[in-house]
């Protein structure tokens, strides 16, 4: 796997995946994009109702979503499970600038420990945040019935990974979510929305970050 560091328009870094010819985040701003999709439209609205949240992330990658979740809800009790088939090397992680950007300096150690910690274990990143990294293919995900409040679906795009944006995969996510649970993702492609609807989600299209008209928020009503 060949990954190359890039600087996005909001000065936060991202990576370019050579074989897939795709970036890990929007070139218009990695942090801007992740904040809008996953935090502002996923985490924060759910947090207003509760203090404990169980989250699944599809694709740990750079760890940016975990860092933003930790820093956006520092005193909420969060269990964060992340599924990643192709972990990045520590050499690549050390080149990322997220924890050196304004507002994130308090989270430098936490960010490093998220990456250096063991896989397949519950890791207490601090008193409130537990991380569980699962090295596996998303298609092999074992349903954990009605356990999760929120899913960050952050695979590479359906153009290059159509096998992940399917009713089969979304059904496992659906069954693992509590009624009222929310899945947020950056792709509003027709086949994605259709697969989510076929699964049983109520699908909403919301305004996207710079460079993207829409994103998707899907709710498991019951
Ligand atoms: C668009 S990147 C986003 C990663 C991460 N959320 C971030 O902010 O850096 C997609 C991630 O999904 C991972 N991935 C790709 N195919 C996968 C699969 N079949 N199962 C699990 N993870 C996969 C990639 O290795 C990559 O880290």
Image (cartoon, rainbow, N blue to C red):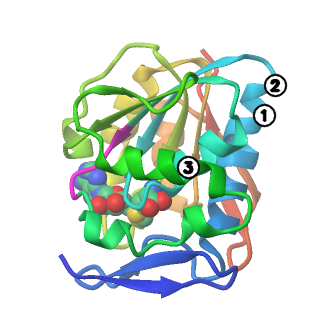
Task: Identify the element where label 1 is drawn.
Answer: helix
94 over 111 or under it: above or below:
below
User: Tags 3 and 1 in contact by the CB under 8 Å rule?
Assistant: no
Q: Quadrant of the N terminus?
A: bottom left
Q: Position of residue 139 (x, y in %)?
A: 23, 42
In this view, the residue in front, 117 or 138, is 117
Within 10 Å of disc 2 (Cα), the crowding (few <14, some 14-19, many 20+) is: few
Task: Identify the element where label 3 is drawn.
Answer: helix
The residue wearing badge 3 is: 67
Q: Earlier in the sequence, mark 3 or mark 2?
A: 2
Within 10 Å of disc 3 (Cα), the crowding (few <14, some 14-19, many 20+) is: some
The residue wearing badge 2 is: 48
Main secondary structure found in the magenta portion: loop
Q: Answer left or right for 118 relative to 47.
A: left
**3 vs 2, front mark:** 3
In this view, the residue in front, 165 or 23, is 23
Ligand 1 within 8 Å, label 1 CB: no
Q: Which residue range is magenta in the image?
A: 82-86
**3 vs 1, front mark:** 3
Task: Identify the element where label 2 is drawn.
Answer: loop
The residue wearing badge 1 is: 45
User: Tags 2 and 1 in contact by the CB under 8 Å rule?
Assistant: yes
Task: Write down the quadrant of residue 145 in the picture.
Answer: top left
102 over 129 or under it: above or below:
below
């Amino acid at each position: 796997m060949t990954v190359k560091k890039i600087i996005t328009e909001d000065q936060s870094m991202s990576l370019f995946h050579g074989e897939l010819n795709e970036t890990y985040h929007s070139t218009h701003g990695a942090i801007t994009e992740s904040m809008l999709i996953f935090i502002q439209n996923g985490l924060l609205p759910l947090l207003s109702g509760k203090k404990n949240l169980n989250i699944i992330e599809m694709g740990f990658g750079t760890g940016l979503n975990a860092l933003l979740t930790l820093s956006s809800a520092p005193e909420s009790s969060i269990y964060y499970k992340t599924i990643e088939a192709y972990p990045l090397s520590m050499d690549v992680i050390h080149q990322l600038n997220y924890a050196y950007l304004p507002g994130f300096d308090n989270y430098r150690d936490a960010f490093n420990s998220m990456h250096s910690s063991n896989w397949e274990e519950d890791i207490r990143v601090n008193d409130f945040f537990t991380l569980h990294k699962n090295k596996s293919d998303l298609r092999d995900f074992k349903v954990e019935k009605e356990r999760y409040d929120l899913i960050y679906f952050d695979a590479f795009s359906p153009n290059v990974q159509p096998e992940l944006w399917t009713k089969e995969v979304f059904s496992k996510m659906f069954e693992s979510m509590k009624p009222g649970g929310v899945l947020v993702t950056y792709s509003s492609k027709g086949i994605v929305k259709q697969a989510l609807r076929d699964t049983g989600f109520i699908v909403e299209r919301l305004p996207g970050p710079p460079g993207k008209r829409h994103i998707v928020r899907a709710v498991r009503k019951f």
